[in-house]
Image: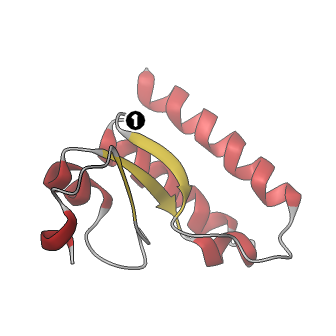
Amino acid sequence: MFDLVKDYPVQVFNWHIWETLPEIKEGLDYTNKCVMGGIARMDITHNRLNELRSQIYRSILSTQGRGLILTPGCGIRHPFAESTIRFIQQVRTETENLLSN
């Protein structure tokens, strides 16, 4: 469906990155617009910390931290652990610091 919407008059694209194609870098290059996503929503709900760490790292690395609003691809199902949200924030900061050196 990207062919149908790539020229849509918006500034940000959001889709289920890591759950559907295209991958984040391809979507960024293809649309030349900001990407909102990079975290699989079910990994938040199920507290899959290793998967979340990997997704955050790959999302920031793929985009070089530019043109990215790091979010789940869709709404997060309740209940979810607040500690997982704090973990995401911590990993994002650590990853940005690691890649900026």
Image quarter (top left, top right, bottom left or bottom right) of the C terminus: top left
Amino acid type, label 1: Gly
Residue name at image x 70 percent, y 43 percent = 89
Q: Nearer the viewer, residue 68 or 97?
A: 68
Q: Residue furthest top?
A: 101
- Secondary structure, mark 1, is loop
Question: Crowding near pointer 1: few (<14 within 10 Å), some, many (20+)?
Answer: some
Please indicate whether residue 76 sits to the left or right of residue 56 in the image.
Answer: right
Q: Quadrant of residue 42?
A: bottom right
Image quarter (top left, top right, bottom left or bottom right) of the N terminus: bottom left
**Residue 38 screen position, x and y as percent:** 47, 58
In the picture of the structure, the residue carrying the numbered disc 1 is 65
Q: Nearer the viewer, residue 78 or 44?
A: 78
In the rendered view, tell whether residue 59 sits above or below residue 76: above
In the rendered view, tell whether residue 88 sits above or below residue 100: below
In the rendered view, tell whether residue 20 sits above or below residue 49: below
**Residue 64 screen position, x and y as percent:** 33, 36
Residue name at image x 53 percent, y 38 percent = 95
Residue name at image x 59 percent, y 41 percent = 92
**Residue 35 screen position, x and y as percent:** 37, 50
Please indicate whether residue 25 sits to the left or right of residue 30 in the image.
Answer: right
Task: Give the color scheme: rainbow, by chain, secondary structure or one colour.
Answer: secondary structure
Please indicate whether residue 57 sits to the left or right of residue 47 in the image.
Answer: left
In the rendered view, tell whether residue 75 sits above or below residue 20: above
Residue name at image x 57 percent, y 68 percent = 51
Q: Quadrant of residue 15?
A: bottom left
**Residue 72 screen position, x and y as percent:** 57, 62
Instruction: State the count of labels.
Output: 1
